[in-house]
Image: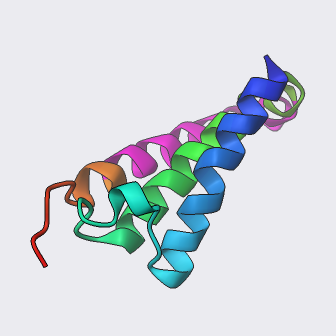
Amino acid sequence: MAPLLIMVGIATVVPGVAALVFGWLPSWLSGHVEHPRIWGVGMLGFGLFVVTQISSLRAHVEDLGWAAVALRYGVLVVGLVALVLSGTRLIRR
């Protein structure tokens, strides 16, 4: 399960950082996302949550207490909200 979570985490964090920093989107999304930097925040939040699902990392987060667990789920919620607000619709240029 951990290799799958690592692959999904990398597949979401890398494009998320690229969109957040450079405004770059993968080619299949370039005409569909209205706000690429907001999309990047969403992908980064989702990716960080997925990476912290790895059992060893999740155990360390749970050892830090309920505030760390709440922060982890807060990052997921912010990421999902950012993905919704990124404006996924066809843009005619």
Residue 18 lies in quadrant: bottom right
Q: Measuring 35% from the left and 58% from the top, which residue is drawn there?
A: 29
The answer to which of 80 and 7 lies nearer the viewer is 7
Q: Is residue 75 left or right of residue 49?
A: left
Quadrant, the N terminus: top right
Residue 14 lies in quadrant: bottom right
Direction left: furthest residue:
92
Direction bottom: furthest residue:
22
The answer to which of 17 and 80 lies nearer the viewer is 17
Q: Is residue 36 left or right of residue 15?
A: left
Q: Is residue 66 above or below residue 76?
A: above
Place of residue 37 in the rendered image (x, y in percent of width and height, measured from the top left): 40, 73
Place of residue 50 in the rendered image (x, y in percent of width and height, measured from the top left): 64, 35
Place of residue 65 in the rendered image (x, y in percent of width and height, measured from the top left): 75, 34
Q: Is residue 52 left or right of residue 59?
A: left
Bounds of the magenta segment: 60-81
Place of residue 32 in the rendered image (x, y in percent of width and height, measured from the top left): 23, 59
The answer to which of 42 and 71 lies nearer the viewer is 42
Q: Is residue 91 visible?
A: yes
> Would you say the magenta stretch is mainly helix, strand or loop?
helix
Q: Is residue 86 above or below residue 52?
A: below
Q: Is residue 53 above or below residue 19?
A: above
Q: Measuring 15% from the left and 55% from the top, which residue is drawn there?
A: 89
Q: Measuring 26% from the left and 49% from the top, which residue is drawn there?
A: 84
Quadrant, the C terminus: bottom left
44 falls in the magenta region: no
Q: Measuring 67% from the left and 32% from the top, which residue is drawn there?
A: 66
Residue 70 lies in quadrant: top right
Q: Is residue 67 visible?
A: no
Q: How did the renderer colour the structure?
A: rainbow
Q: Is residue 31 left or right of residue 10?
A: left
